Amino acid sequence: DVQLVQSGAEVKKPGESLKISCKGSGYSFSSYWIAWVRQMPGKGLEWLGIIYPGDSKTRYSPSFQGQVTISADKSIGTAYLQWSSLKASDTAIYYCARHVSTVLPFDYWGQGTLVTVSS
Amino acid sequence: EIVLTQSPATLSLSPGERATLSCGASQSVSSSYLAWYQQKAGLAPRLLIYDASIRAAGIPDRFSGSGSGTDFTLTISRLEPEDFAVYFCQQYSSSSPLTFGGGTKVEIK
């Protein structure tokens, strides 16, 4: 079975760094895009960007370019989303999701990682 | 960037009734690259429909999608108790940043 398993909830202070993960299993991890999606409390879905683990090619939403970094380690089947300096406004649930291709939607999603940034 | 506007924001219906959800795009969505997702409280979204009208694997046939260009519709023919949730549309045109609509909440009347 295809599974995307994300790392656990995090509580951080403003200015701290953070890296969360998404581990894929049950399919060829290198051959499918992984997207990251933000959902702020009680709000809708926002696309941050995508990565193709096979060659680490990335594409970012203009709204999030420079705010986050997406990476992947295909040897361990894991994608990452990281911040160098968190803000309170980064408080949200972050989902990873699989894309068969960039002209198909997300067919599998991780369970989400809650990131809370508070002083 | 293509902006997607969903309406209504909230739909209050009873089980057994028909639900019609709309998604309007600020510019034409190429090749009908539009999907619908269902999200229940505390859970990740689930893919229902892609390419505007194709049901994803395992999705009941009471869910149907239609539309093209800038106007798309998700129809639930007869609401089951498990269908009360929030629904999002998404466009995934490769020539534009991927975007989601703001969501429609289908609640029990």
Image (cartoon, coloured by chain):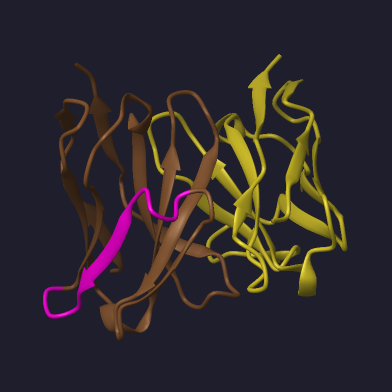
Chain colours: A brown, B yellow
Task: Identify which residue, A70 or A93, lies in the foreground.
Answer: A70
- Residue A73: within the magenta? yes
Residue A100 visible in this rendered orientation of the protein:
yes
Residue at the location (79% across, 28% down)? B8
Q: Is residue A18 above or below residue A40?
A: below
Q: Does residue B2 lie above or below B44 as drawn? A: below
Tell me which residue sits at (54%, 66%) in the image: B57
Expressed as whole percent of the image width and height from the top left, the position of residue B60 reads 62, 54
Q: Is residue A28 visible?
A: no
Quadrant for the N terminus of chain B in the image? bottom right
Residue B32 coordinates in the image, percent (x, y)? 77, 68
Q: Quadrant of residue B29?
A: bottom right
Q: Residue furthest left?
A: A76
Which corner quadrant of the image does residue A31 belong to? bottom left
Q: Nearer the viewer, residue B60 or B74?
A: B74
* Magenta region includes residue A48: no
Q: Report the magenta stretch's main SS.
A: loop
Left or right of B74 on screen, residue B97: left
Q: Residue at x 11, y 74 (%)?
A: A76
Residue in front for this viewpoint, A119 or A106: A119
Residue B62 image point, x, y percent: 71, 50
- Left or right, residue B8 beside residue A118: right
Spot occupied by residue B89 in the image (x, y as percentages of width and height): 67, 49
In the image, the segment drawn in magenta is: A64-76
B41 w.r.t. B91: above or below: above
